[in-house]
Image (cartoon, helix red, strand yellow):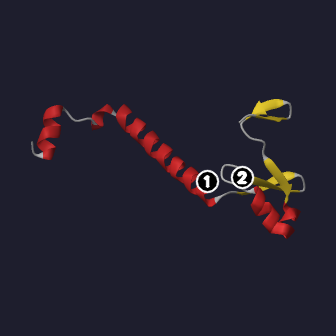
Amino acid sequence: MKKLYQGKEVDFVPNILPVSDLRNYNEVLKNCQVGEPVFLTKNGRGKFVVMDIEDYEREKAEKKLLMKLQEAEEAVKDESAWMSLDELKKSVGV
């Protein structure tokens, strides 16, 4: 669902709170739902992000996958590491 944020349509409106709101951390945690992190500011500048553990784990897994894909793309570009079909068959015993 699109929402208006600063006059533009966006997929989500960031939930931004001052770090002092952590005094009432239960309210902050209520604002932290799956897919909607809470951004905490200190002296008007972004300082921390509080997010659902499922979102954190998913982002961590996505980052790991992207790194593996980048490694694979780099390996494909290195043609000296390629094997011919005969070499592959020999290496697997076929």
Q: Name the residue under label 2.
A: 37
Name the element at disc 1.
helix
Q: In this view, does 44 lie to the left or right of 87?
A: right
**Quadrant of the rendering where the C terminus is positioned:** top left
Spot occupied by residue 33 in the image (x, y as percentages of width and height): 70, 55
Outermost residue, right direction? 43
Which residue type carries mark 1? Asp
- The quadrant holding residue 86 is top left
Outermost residue, left direction? 94
Task: Give the tally of numbered discs.
Answer: 2
Do residues under tags 1 and 2 come within 8 Å of each other at their CB atoms?
yes
Mark 1: give few (<14), some (14-19) or many (20+) Cα within 10 Å.
some
Q: Residue at x 52, y 47 (%)?
A: 62
Mark 2: give few (<14), some (14-19) or many (20+) Cα within 10 Å.
some
Outermost residue, front direction? 1
Spot occupied by residue 74 in the image (x, y as percentages of width and height): 41, 37
Which residue type carries mark 2? Pro
Question: Mark 1 vs mark 2: which is more N-terminal?
Answer: 2
- The quadrant holding residue 42 is bottom right
Q: Which residue is drawn at 76% across and 54% down?
A: 38
- The quadrant holding residue 84 is top left
Q: In this view, does 64 lie to the left or right of 17?
A: left
Q: Name the residue under label 1.
A: 55
**Quadrant of the rendering where the N terminus is positioned:** top right
Looking at this view, is 55 or 76 the one in front?
55
Q: Residue at x 77, y 30 (%)?
A: 9
Name the element at disc 2.
loop
From what the image shows, is residue 61 above or below residue 80?
below
Outermost residue, bottom direction? 23
Spot occupied by residue 22 in the image (x, y as percentages of width and height): 83, 66
Alpha carbon of mark 1 to alpha carbon of mark 2: how far?
9 Å
